[in-house]
Amino acid sequence: MVTPDIHIRIPRKLYESINDLVVKEGHYRSAPEFILECTRQKLNEIKKNKIDQRKIKLYWHRLRMEKEKEI
């Protein structure tokens, strides 16, 4: 089942700035396309950071456990 899109409001000045900087220069076709791409990139960055944090915590946990076994 496909759910309908959710629409959000953005400040007009922000929309106009995006249009002036990236749409009119030909980098993106529209401001919403730019916003969606930025959002995807940020979500991927957050997911990667969470995975990296888990790896670091796991590493330190294992290291601590090994040191406790030695004692």
Image (cartoon, grey):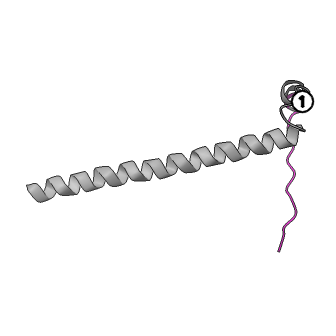
Q: Where does the image place residue 52, in percent across and percent down from the top left?
A: 46, 48
Q: Residue furthest bottom?
A: 1
Dominant SS type (magenta): loop
Front residue of 56/24: it is: 24
Instruction: Point out the image quarter for the C terminus.
Output: bottom left
Residue 51 is one of the magenta-drawn residues: no
Q: Where does the image place residue 3, in percent across and percent down from the top left?
A: 84, 67
Residue 20 placement: quadrant: top right
Within 10 Å of disc 1 (Cα), the crowding (few <14, some 14-19, many 20+) is: some
**Highlighted range, magenta:** 1-14
Say which amino acid is labelled 1: Asn
Q: Where does the image place residue 22, in percent across and percent down from the top left?
A: 84, 29
Q: Which residue is mark 1?
A: 19
Q: Is residue 70 above or below residue 15?
A: below
Residue 38 placement: quadrant: top right
Q: Report the side of 33 relative to 44 (left or right).
A: right
Q: Is residue 39 above or below residue 1?
A: above
Residue 8 is one of the magenta-drawn residues: yes
Tag 1's secondary structure? helix
Residue occupying image coordinates x 78% and y 45%: 36
Q: Residue furthest left?
A: 71
Q: Report the side of 32 relative to 56 (left or right).
A: right
Q: Report the side of 5 relative to 48 (left or right).
A: right
Front residue of 28/45: it is: 28
Residue 1 placement: quadrant: bottom right
Residue occupying image coordinates x 15% and y 52%: 67
Q: Where does the image place residue 12, in percent across and percent down from the top left?
A: 91, 32
